[in-house]
Amino acid sequence: MADSKIRNEIHVFINGVEHRIGGEKAFLPLAQYLRTHSLPGTKVVCAEGDCGACTVLASKLKQTSAAAVEWTSFQTINSCIAPMYLFDMGSLVTVEGLSEQEELNEVQDQMRAFHGGQCGYCTPGMVCALSSLAESSHCSGKNISEKKARNHLTGNLCRCTGYEPILQAATHLDLSKWKPLKDKYLTASQAQGFAVRLNDSLMIEAGSRRFSAPASFTVAVDQKNQSPETRLVAGATDLGVLHNKGKVFLDNAMSLHKIADTEKIDIRADGVWVGARVTLTQLENFVANTLPELSRLLRIFASPQIKNQGTLVGNVMNGSPIGDSIPALLALEARVHLQSVTGLREVPLSQFYKAYKVFDVKPNEIATGVLIPVLGTEWKSRFFKVSLRKDLDISAVTFAAALKLDGTRISEARFAMGGVGPTVVRLPELEKAAQGQKFSEALFADLGKQVRSLIKPISDLRASHEYRLKVAENLFKKCHLELEQEIPCP
Ligand SMILES: Cc1cc2nc3c(=O)[nH]c(=O)nc-3n(C[C@H](O)[C@H](O)[C@H](O)COP(=O)(O)OP(=O)(O)OC[C@H]3O[C@@H](n4cnc5c(N)ncnc54)[C@H](O)[C@@H]3O)c2cc1C
Ligand code: FES
Ligand code: FES
């Protein structure tokens, strides 16, 4: 590998062609860059990450050892909210890159055969999403069931065709006819070409705009110290939406994606370490066995496109009172690591959220990751999200419970809720009330009654104050009902 250099342009393959992008263009949303550079197949409808019309496939080159690099497998992302500068050393495939010499690929062919499109506005996004499903199913040798197709398409809306023909196209894919995209677009020679530039840092300026991606934490904290107003960008699934709505201007931004350590997710003596750039999809898969309840919760977090791009640290640092991971992280007693020029601080999340969007973070600090303690076998947990629809929706109320049991007696209880006040809250009064008690229906009914006087939910578009109170009460009953199956009471 070559020594790290500073580049003022990003290098990225788009449908196998290398693009070098600097200046203003590096700040464009990816979809806008594509559409203004002869690739108008990618559509923009909502520009908020909600509809999937802008779906493209993305891979990136990763260092796997001191001398080896590897492409990650293609995953879908929403190109409308992702700034171009995040894709340095990446390989992107748009709908134009799917067909071969005017010949439709297997997904396009089945979509045609089953009449999977009418106005066609959602179709490029649907085809890209289904192509990523075909690619991963081809690699794993697994068939595509209707359930799998439905789950994979939660981030793609169609307003006129109806989903039945699209699902039929998905389940009729003949994977023996699938020509893997990785063979065409993720080749060893493309990797070699990029490998010598992989560790370069980025500093792109355009007028008053500045984007940096340092190659080490030392440089990152130094830059943040010199310029505390610099905004950290992770996957930009929150920031990209705010930017498109004109609420946040990412004129001075920094990403940690050139620091390999930020991609780490591993099990340590004190829990699961989730680096600042670990995506929600990676987390969902990684904790399937160690923290299965967290993994289960993440299944209904946003859509595949958002989870492939968005990070856990982004969710924590965005600190929304309805951030879905936060109640679970509070119940697991997770800690965020904050680094500055003066050193590292480990802050328990229970002390991190001070008021609505007011956090215990200093202007010169950056988050390097989150440590999530793993519960021992004596613990039982339940994490719930209640929203108007199951998939791709913002929560009305979220709930997390972790109970340490000594037989049927609760020796320690942790409860946290979101959507019930200006921050996600822990409920120490209820934790105390449950401690030492027998796990029983009566106890949880009582905790549900008590919670009503401890929370202060507002009424908004998603739910009324009274509805949230009722849901909060009922979630305690649901928690008992579900755990009853696991805690046999004598
Ligand atoms: C369509 C759609 C659906 C969504 N669904 C859900 C959902 O179901 N549940 C949910 O909770 N959220 C949801 N979100 C919100 C969002 O996807 C999550 O909050 C996600 O975890 C944000 O991660 P990110 O990496 O994209 O963060 P970014 O947008 O990059 O950043 C978010 C915040 O974190 C800060 N930040 C990022 N990295 C660091 C760092 N290293 N140090 C300090 N600060 C940092 C940024 O400055 C910013 O303030 C959804 C968003 C969209 C667009
Ligand atoms: S345009 Fe709707 S998700 Fe991007
Ligand atoms: S074909 Fe018209 S929105 Fe899907």
Image: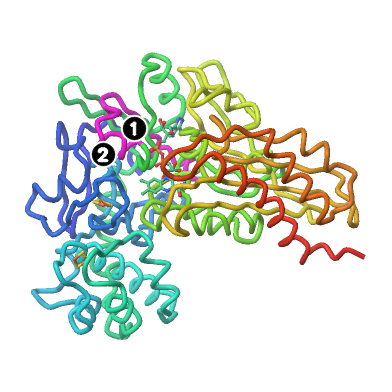
Above/below status of 453 relative to 104: above
Residue 157 in picture, x, y percent from top left: 29, 61
On residue 66, the disc is: none
Judge by depth and name the residue closer to the eye, 268 or 228. Answer: 228
Above/below status of 8 relative to 72: above
- Determine crowd level at label 2: few under 14, some 14-19, many 20+ residues with C-alpha closer than 10 A: many
Is 179 displayed left or right of 302 in the figure? left
Circle 2 residue: 85
Residue 290 in picture, x, y percent from top left: 66, 56
Is 257 part of what is drawn in magenta?
Answer: yes
Circle 1 residue: 213
When asked about the image quadrant of residue 327, the answer is: top right
Residue 176 in picture, x, y percent from top left: 32, 85
When asked about the image quadrant of residue 468, the answer is: top right
- Determine crowd level at label 1: few under 14, some 14-19, many 20+ residues with C-alpha closer than 10 A: many
Q: Secondary structure at mark 2?
A: helix
Is 423 displayed left or right of 136 in the figure? right
Residue visible at 83% across and 43% down in the picture: 434
Query: What amino acid is found at the position of numbered circle 2 in the picture?
Result: Tyr
Label 1–label 2 contact, CB within 8 A: yes
Is 104 part of what is drawn in magenta?
Answer: no
Q: CA distance from mark 1 to mark 2?
A: 9 Å
Instruction: Return the disc, 1 or 2, that comes first in the chain's sequence.
Output: 2
Q: How many marks?
A: 2
Residue sitting at the far right: 490
Query: What amino acid is found at the position of numbered circle 1 in the picture?
Result: Ala
Question: Mark 1 or mark 2: which is in front?
Answer: 2
Q: Which quarter shows the C terminus?
A: bottom right
Residue visible at 71% across and 42% down in the picture: 415
The span shown in magenta is: 239-263
